[in-house]
Every structure is written in C-alpha cells, then in structure tokens.
Image (tube, rainbow, N blue to C red):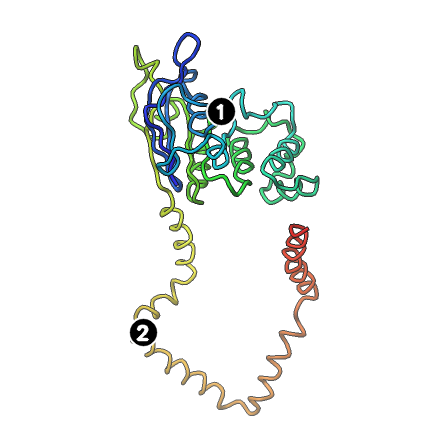
Amino acid sequence: MQITLSGVRVEGRRDPMLEAMDLAWSTGECLLVAGEPGHGHTALALVATGRFVPSSGTVRLDGAAVPPSALRARTAVVDVPGISEPDDALSLADVVAEGLALAGRRSLPRDVSRWLEERALTEDRGRRVDQLPGVVRTAVLAALATENPDVRFVVLTLPDRHGGEPAGWWETARTLAASGLGVLVQCTRSSARDLGVDLPPARGATLHEPPRVVLREVPGAPVEEPAATAVLPVAGPDAEPAVEPEPATEPEPAAEAEVEDELEPSPDPDARAEEELDDPLDGAPPGDTPIHDTLAATPADDAQEEAR
C-alpha cells in the first residue's frame, strides 16, 4: 500500500501551517522527515493520515482518492504534541489500558499486566509516562498504536523531544517497518545529522523550510540477517559435511569401525545397553516434568482467554 501527497499545503491564520510539499510513503519502508519544530510537523502528520483536510493538493491511497475516514482507518499518529500524546500524569499501566481499548482490544487489568510482562515492563507499570526514557515511551506508544490490525501506516512525531539517542527510536521505527508497516518519523535536523544524514544546519531562509524526506530505508531484508547468523555458529561444524558430502563420508566408516572394536570385547553388550537406557531415566531431576508441563500449558490458557 502507498500514501501519496501531491502539492499538499495547509494555510494558517497568519502564515502557512505547512508549505506545499510532495511525499510518497509505502508499507514496508521507513522514512525520516527532518525540519525545525513549529514548521509543519503536526500539520503533516494530520494531513498524511486523513485527520486534517489540506487547503490545497491531494492525498491518495494506492493512487485513488479516498474519503478521510478510510485513510484514518489505515493509519495511526503516535505522540503528536497536543493531539495524541498521553497525559503526563498517567501511569504506564493507564496508558497501556487506554491504548488497548482504542485499538479494539480487551483492556482488563490482567490484559494490561500480560502486555507489560511480555515486554519486560512490569516493574515500570506504576511510573508516570513522563518519567519513562524517551526511547521506551516511543516504543510503548508505537506498539499500542499497532495493536489495531487495520493499521498499516504509523507516524512518529518528534520522538527526539523526549531525549535519548536518536538511534534508539530510529531502530524502533525500522522494526515496525520490517514487520510490514509504513513508518514516517518526524525529527529535527540535528537529530537527522546524528543518524548520519548529511544535512547542513538551518540558517536564514532554510530555517523556515517545511519538513522534507532526508532518509528512506526498506529494512525488511536486513532483519533476516541476524536469524541466519545466529544459526550458523551452532550448525557450523555440521554444515561443512552437508555442503561437501564426499569428505564427510570418509571419516564415518572409521568411526563405526572404532565403535565396533570397542563393543566386541564387551562380554554382555545387551546388558550394558539396557543399563545405559535405564540410568538416564532414573537420574532425571524430578523437577523437569512439572516445568515443561507449565510451559506447554501457558499458550493453551492464553488462547482460551483470547477466544473468550
């Protein structure tokens, strides 16, 4: 899917809220849009997601003009100042409960506890949202926005205003894009430079330029690399014989011969085999079975609760 902005402009009472700009934004990719605060970030986030009608220009979904309601159903705006940012006085648990409810998910206390536990945030459930590190705040709000399965596009507005390294919230955006979402991240020019973008400081007329795309990534392919490299070290010794079957077959007969030589002098090979089979069972720690039973039962219990 793709959202396309063509000549979009938003007029204000005195000055334009957003100067005319073009933007193409697809699922599976991550866009970084840089601009100084107060020069169109909020207007761009709302226009691109169908939450504000532009004064001029068009916003299309997959090349077709659609009503704003259809665009809103496919998009989510995360932490937009004065629009979708949570009340700083709310606790993390309250924010999660509200986010799940807005996404159409069940938001009972046990659902909130489970959501936090899955993300290792149980100890932070009572903290005010404004006390969370900036990267954690952005990750939590973005995850809640994507709980709605209809959402295909996400806008993260100025996550750098909460502090922290830009690499943290940019990695969150890349992870969302790798899952198939279209992610639009708005930041200041200085944060873009911290991410390696060759962007000169804003001076003179450039200080009031509208936000513009300075970086575009499609992180779907790089996400698969860690999974492949994680397997290689474990399977490395066995992988070489699999690639070259001829050398692998030569040492195997020698190994079998050595095993046969060791077994021949044994007077009672069958008895030794029976002892070897009995010992592991008798020596097994009694606590292993209940633990595995518990782990196996957990997914079934979760599925029953979701079915309800």
The vertical placement of 119 against 249, above or below, is above
Image coordinates for residue 31, horizontal then vertical, percent: 37, 33
Which residue corresponds to mark 2? Answer: 245
Image coordinates for residue 198, horizontal then vertical, percent: 29, 26
Which residue corresponds to mark 1? Answer: 163
The vertical placement of 226 against 104, above or below, is below
In the image, 33 versus 76, the foreground residue is: 76
- On screen, residue 6 versus residue 115, left or right, reads left
Query: Where is residue 253, by image quadrant?
Result: bottom left
Residue drawn at the location 51% of the way across and 21% of the way down: 81
The vertical placement of 36 against 274, above or below, is above
Q: Secondary structure at mark 1?
A: loop
Residue drawn at the location 35% of the way across and 17% of the way down: 19
Mark 1 belongs to which amino acid? Gly
In the image, 259 versus 27, the foreground residue is: 27
Mark before the other along the chain sequence, 1 or 2: 1
Image coordinates for residue 133, horizontal then vertical, percent: 54, 29
Q: Looking at this rendering, what residue extends furthest in the bottom direction?
A: 267
Q: Secondary structure at mark 2?
A: helix
Mark linked to residue 209: none
Label 1 neighbour load within 10 Å: few <14, some 14-19, many 20+:
few
Query: Where is residue 64, by image quadrant?
Result: top left
